[in-house]
Image (tube, helix red, strand yellow):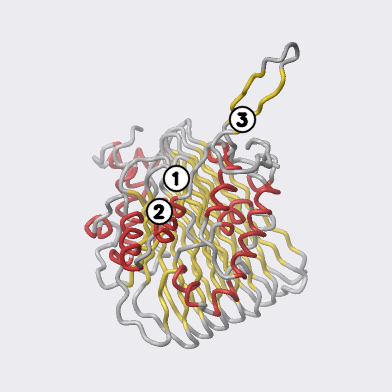
Amino acid sequence: MSEIATDVVTREGSGVNDLVTRDAAKGSRKTTTTRAPSSIEVYREDFSMQKAGPAWLNQLRAKAIERFEALGFPTTKNEDWHFTSVAPIAERSFRSAIIDADSITAEGSDRRESSRRRSDAVNALGVKPADVASFSFGQNDWHQLVFINGLFDRALSSIDGLNGKLRIDSLARAIEDGSPSVEIHLGRIAAFDQHAFTALNTAFVADGAFIELANDAVVEKPIHLVFVSGGEGVSQPRNLIVAGRHSRVTVIESYVSLRESPYFTNAVTEIAVGEGAHVDHYKLQRENQSAFHVGTVQARQARNSTLHSFSFAVGGALARTNIYTSLDGDAATCTLNGLYLTDGTQHIDNQTSIEHLAPNCPSHEVYKGVLDGRSHGVFNGKVYVHPEAQKTDGKQSNNNLLLSPHARVDTKPQLEIFADDVKCTHGATVGRLDEMAMFYLNSRGIGAETARTLLTYAFAADVIETIELAPLKAELEKIVLARFADSPT
C-alpha cells in the first residue's frame, strides 16, 4: 500500500465522510470524529458507480481496481519513481467526470434527449469549434476526434472519407458495437501488474479513441486526437490503435486546456503494430500550469514493423510520460524521440522502455530537455536485450540544457544486455549555454535575449528535425522559440 495515500478502509455505503463513534474512556458520553475518505477510497466509490459494460470488460475493470488498491500510489522508494513524488496527485480526491455523464444517460428515458443531455455534460467546459481549431496546426482536412474531459464529442470532431479498410471511432462506440479487436487487444498490451496508474486507468476504461487499420491499409491523412480538459476532476481516456499487416498511419495525441485549473489527466494508449506495419505516433502534452498529467503509450511490434514515436512535454505542474515498446518480431524497428521544456516550478518526468525480444532489431532514441526557473526534469530510459535478441543495434541519448542556476535534472539511461552479439550505446549530458557562443553572438551585435533564444532553439533543433510531419514541426518550432524568449537570463 502506498506510503503517500491514506490506508484503504473497507466500508459500506458511499458517504463522503466516515463517522466513527466510540464510548469515552469514562462515562457514557459518546464522541464522534470525522475523517475524509482517502483518494483511493474515492476512486473505489466512483468505480462502483460507473456504467457496466460487457462481461469481459467488467472482469478487466475489476482486476484492475483490485490491482490498483494492492499497489497503491507509487512512492520514491519505487525505482521507476525515485525522482518523482506523486503526493500532489495522491493527496487529492479527483472525482470522475465520466460518472456524471453516464448517470445522465441512464436516467434519460428518451434516447435522443439523453444523448443531447450527455453531450451538454460532456462539453460543460463550453469548448467551441474555434477553440479546437487553435490546436489543429491549421489543418482542416485531417481526421480529428475531440474529447472533453475524456469523453468523445462528435459535434466537435471531423471524420471524413473513411473506407472499409479504416475505422476511426470512439472506444465507447467500439465497445458497444462488440468490435472483436477491442476485446482481443484492450488491456493486453499495457500491462498493469506493476503500474498503478495504468491499473487505475484500466479500472475506468470507458471512452477514448479506437483506430483500426485492415491489412495493407494506408491512411494518407493524419489522425489527430484532441483531449481538452478542465475543472478539478479526473479524466482517464483510453486509446487503442490496431495497425494490420503492412498498413501505415500517423496519429497525433494532443492534451490541452483552455484555462488554468487543477485537474488530473491519466491517459493510456495501446498500439498493436502488425507485421510490416508502420506507425508514426506523436504525443503532445500541453496541459495548463496547474494541471497534473500521467500518460502512458505502450506498443507491441511484430516482425518487420516500424514505430516512430515523438513525445513533446511542456505543460503541467507535475507531469509524467511513459513510452514503452516491445520488439516481439524479427527485424522490428523503433525510434523514440522526445523534447521537454520546463519553467517555473514545473516537474516533468519522462520514462522510456525498449524491450528487445527478437533478433535483428534496431532501436534509436534521442531525448532532449531545456529547463529554466526552479523546474525539475527527469529522464529514465531503459533498453533491455533478451538472450534471444542477437544482432541488436541500440542507441540511446539524453541531453539537457539548464538555463537557470536553480533548474535541475536527474537523468538515468540504462542498458541491460543478456545477448553477446549486440551493438548498444547510451549516454547523457547536462550543461549550460556555451559562454563562448554567447560572446560570439553578442560581439556580432545580437542582444543577450536574442542570443539566448537562438542557442536554445539550436540545442532543441536536432530532435525537432526528426519530425516528418511539416505542420507539426513548424508549430513546435514556434513554441520552442517563444517559450524562453522572454525569460530572464
What is the three-letter code of the residue carrying label 2?
A: Asn
Dot 2 crowding, Cα within 10 Å, few <14, some 14–19, many 20+: many
Considering only vertical position in the picture, is 125 above or below 52? above
Name the element at disc 3.
Answer: strand
| Mark 1 or mark 3, whichever is nearer to me | 3
Residue at the disc numbered 1:
233
Could you tell whether 254 is left or right of 442 in the image? right
Residue at the disc numbered 3:
19
Mark earlier in primary sequence (3, 2): 3
Residue at the limit of the structure toward the top, as seen here:
26
Residue 224 visible in the snapshot: yes
Residue at the disc numbered 2:
149
Name the element at disc 2.
Answer: loop
Residue shown at the point (69%, 62%) measured from the top left: 384
Considering only vertical position in the picture, is 322 above or below 307? above
Label 1 and label 3: CA atoms lie apart by 25 Å
Residue 266: give x, y in percent of width and height. Answer: 51, 52
Could you tell whether 321 is left or right of 251 in the image? right
Name the element at disc 1.
Answer: loop
Residue shown at the point (47%, 44%) measured from the top left: 292
Circles 2 and 1 in contact, beta carbons < 8 Å = yes
What is the three-letter code of the residue carrying label 1?
A: Gly
Residue 376: give x, y in percent of width and height. Answer: 51, 38
Considering only vertical position in the picture, is 224 above or below 221? above
Quadrant of image for the N terminus? top right
Considering only vertical position in the picture, is 444 above or below 235? above
Work out whether residue 262 or residue 409 is closer to the camera in this orientation and state it.
Answer: 262
Residue shown at the point (71%, 49%) measured from the top left: 70
